[in-house]
Image (cartoon, grey):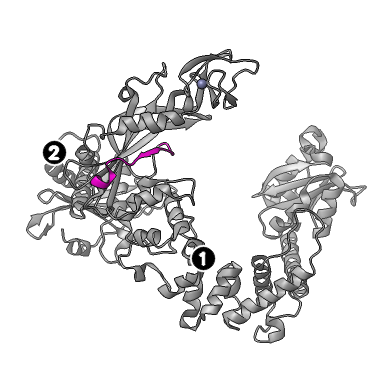
Amino acid sequence: MDLKKIKKIPFGDFSEKSRVRWKVEVRRPVVSGERLLAVDFLRNTECTAYKREDSSFRIVCGKKSREVRGIMAADADKPVRVTDEALRAISGCRHEYILISEKDEAALSRFLGGASQNHYIDLLADWAEEVREEQKKRERQKRGGLMDEDYRLCPEALPAGLLEFIRETVLPEDDTLVYKKGNVRGLCYACGQEVRARGQRFRQNERVRCPNCGQEVICVLEGSSAFRADFVENIIAVQKGTDGETVFFRQWLLRRDPSAHWERIEVFLKETARYAVRGRKTAKWQRESKENYYMNCERYDMEEWTRWRDNRIYDGGYYFYPGGAAEALQGTRMQYADLEGYLADKTSRWKNPVHFLEYHAKYPVMEFLWKKGYKTITHRRIGGMSRETRDAIRWQRDSLKECFKFPLRFLRLKLPEEWTLDDIARLNALWQMQGEKLKEEEIRMFLEMRIDTKDVLAALPYASVGRILGYIKKQTEKRQAAFVKRHDWEKPPGFASVAHEYRDYLSECTQLGLDLHNREVLFPKDLKAAHERTMAQVSFEKNKTDQGKFQKAVDRLEKYSWQKDGLLIRPAGTQEELRDEGRALHHCVGGYIRQMADGETAIFFVRKLDAPDTPYFTLELQKKRVIQCRTAHNASYERYPEILSFVQEWEQEVVTGNEGKKKKEEPAA
Ligand SMILES: [Zn+2]
């Protein structure tokens, strides 16, 4: 479908004084030999009944080509791209009142057919959704991605040796004792015997020695929501699909045999999830899902295998059955992965062989990282990366050189297992700033000091990395030499904290307009003293400006000053006064200074005319409405009838009332 031509047909908003939001216009342009249906939804600019600002949009449908596209009017000057935004927008119009001519409606009817509830807009939305799904499927197929129904390529039979694996590895590690209500009788899954508590009773999640076999077991109450009460563990095995190409990781949940005899393990296995890898593409389906509420977890079955968006392991932990893996991975991108080494590795307690293999298929750099010993990084990638380090390595690239943002020779500056993703991210930032100017010695120092790149960046325009790091190092050493421990938990300052202080100092220097080209300013002999000076200076300057702002806010509120029946009300005059009022009445009005200066709120004092300087009631006004009015210890004015009526009258007469009314005298009661 050539959208360029269709985009050239102008469309925009329409305008009518009514609550109608959309006017619909239909066209039948011919593009590349196909008569298309183009439906414009024109937004009524006069209609303000809806808060959200929608944009006019156009839906283009091709019956023969089975295609649907959307164009937002707001994107008219951008290059043509297919947008799902318009397809979402039309779905929102299903039940809305629209304007459409009889002729246009007839055109929609001819194209869509069927019976409509709302001028064929509902049918058009259905049609668009259906065709969009088809289109997505075609696109996915073209990219070689896994299709929703590809779970069917998974063999149904259990992998050879799985039951033996469960019997020999999983069951012997099951240290659970399921006890009955009453906390005395139970079943030990370590020895498979019914047991009775001796002395101490069984309690949820407590470790005890089994009265029968003596093994340490964890107690769980029968029928409780604890996972162990009903299940032993999840188990995942790998199998090649029936197409000979797709690799499946199948996940079963092993339910407890209530007799603990385990004669027929297969009866207690329930397949819950499938993860597939084909080429570089991955997919996941689930047959079971769960909902968590109030600390309880409700599992429910799904009628069919359902494609899942995330690639997380369902249910968290699992046993990995490695039997048949070599055969299943043969001929795939995962075939050279060091699965055995990974499973035997002791550097990380938490392992996820499914992701280890999956990421070998997706990211060629994985094999290099693991085999060369970058274990910390590999474990991090598999366990989940932070937002800060997610892009430290260009995972998707094919060549090693392109995966790293700095020259590969820098990797030699540290032992492979010592490298972290954080190091990589920090060096990336430094390399981006300095490039070839960087000396290896500087990098080594930078990595060793473990300081945040941002703490160095501020000084880089004025000095070399080596010079800056040397300064931070010297200041840190000086600080450490003078350090006296007063509490056990106190630690001498490290490079990172001094570097951070240096960054604060530099930023204050910039704020104060100090000349950083001056070496005395850039590298003060005593950083701590210099920082204290700049901090004090900055806070002084800031208060000065705030005071001006505060005073302006007070001037604007002066017009609400008023007095009646022996009471007066006026805005807080100064910051000091506001602070004193809070102190005298024991409430927290002192903290409102900034909000008042910014005009977000207004604080007024209600006082007795014969004691105008003594705090009495404090009132907060926002958008001309009284938010609160309080006296000592936060007591509200609603309990004081004379204050209540004074404030209500003030609100009506002075704050929201008109000028004429305000001046008029109240008739005598
Ligand atoms: Zn036992």
- Mark 1, Cα crowd under 10 Å, few <14 / some 14-19 / many 20+, is many
The mark lying in front, picked from 2 and 1, is: 1
Q: Amino acid at mark 1?
A: Asp
The N terminus: image quadrant = bottom left
Instruction: Tell whether 30 sits left or right of 363.
Output: left
Q: Residue furthest front?
A: 213
Residue 261 position (above or below residue 514): above
The picture quadrant where one finds residue 444 is bottom right
The residue identified by callout 2 is: 113
Within the magenta stretch, is there residue 529?
A: no
Residue name at image x 39 percent, y 61 percent: 369
The residue identified by callout 1 is: 423
Q: Secondary structure at mark 2?
A: loop
Q: Does the image show residue 222?
A: yes
Please tell me which residue lies in front, 379 or 573. Answer: 379
Instruction: Tell whether 6 sits left or right of 581.
Output: left
Q: Amino acid at mark 2?
A: Gly
Q: Tell me the magenta residue range.
A: 315-328
Within the magenta stretch, is there residue 316?
A: yes
Please tell me which residue lies in front, 507 or 600. Answer: 507
Rendering coords of residue 214 (x, y %): 56, 23
Residue name at image x 43 percent, y 31 percent: 291
The picture quadrant where one finds residue 632 is top right
Which badge, 2 or 1, is on the more N-terminal residue?
2
Residue name at image x 47 percent, y 22 percent: 189
Rendering coords of residue 533 (x, y %): 77, 74
Residue name at image x 19 percent, y 40 percent: 153
Q: Residue furthest right?
A: 610
- Mark 2, Cα crowd under 10 Å, few <14 / some 14-19 / many 20+, is few
